[in-house]
Image: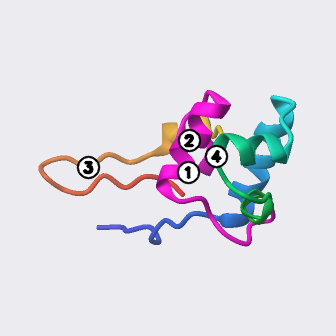
Amino acid sequence: MYMKEYPVVDARATGQRIRELRRELRLTVSQIRDFMGFESDQAVYKWQRGDSLPTVDNLYALSVLFNTTIDNIIRGSRPEEDEKSSSVHAGELKILPL
């Protein structure tokens, strides 16, 4: 059976996506900081640079703020890859594209 590499979250691409979504909604980093209840802007800047990733709780909050899915924040829209995802039957693993 053919196995793809273990999928990982690309912190830099996720950060770029957070920046894009923020700009599309014309939000400032300070507005995200206030929404998240942070004392400083540094966490948001670290996410945008790809220096760190938001926690699951913070990803959920961002998805609500941006009115999108966590998957869209992490991966962006890649419908052509969704069509290529391989499904396996009879209790085997379903392998999704990176």
In x, y percent, where is residue 19?
81, 47
**Residue at figure coordinates x 64%, y 64% from the top left:** 10
Q: CA distance from mark 3 to mark 2?
A: 33 Å
Q: Which residue is mark 1?
A: 58
Seen as rendered, the residue at the extreme front is 39
> Within the image, what quadrant is residue 66 found in?
top right
Q: Could you tell me which secondary element the residue under label 1 belongs to? A: helix
Q: Which residue is mark 3?
A: 88
Mark 3 / mark 2, whichever is N-terminal:
2
Magenta segment, which residues?
49-75
Look at the numbered discs 3 and 2 and tell me whether their residues touch, using CB distance below 8 Å: no
Kind of residue at disc 4: Met
Mark closer to the observer (2, 4): 4
Mark 3 or 2, closer to the camera: 2
Position in image of residue 26 (x %, y %): 87, 31
Give the amino acid at mark 1. Asn
Q: Which residue is mark 4?
A: 36
> Which numbered mark, 4 or 1, is in the foreground of this view?
4
Of discs 3 and 4, which sits in the foreground? Answer: 4
Height in image: 77 above or below 57?
above
Which tag, 2 or 4, sits closer to the chain's start? Answer: 4
Q: Are marks 1 and 2 in contact (CB under 8 Å)?
A: yes
Above or below 11: residue 22: above
Dot 2 lies on which element?
A: helix
Gap in angstroms between the C-alphas marked 1 and 2? 5 Å
Q: What residue is pinned by disc 2? A: 61
Q: Looking at the image, tell me whether mark 1 or mark 3 is earlier in sequence order.
A: 1
Residue 88 appears left or right of 39: left
The answer to which of marks 3 and 4 sits earlier in the sequence is: 4
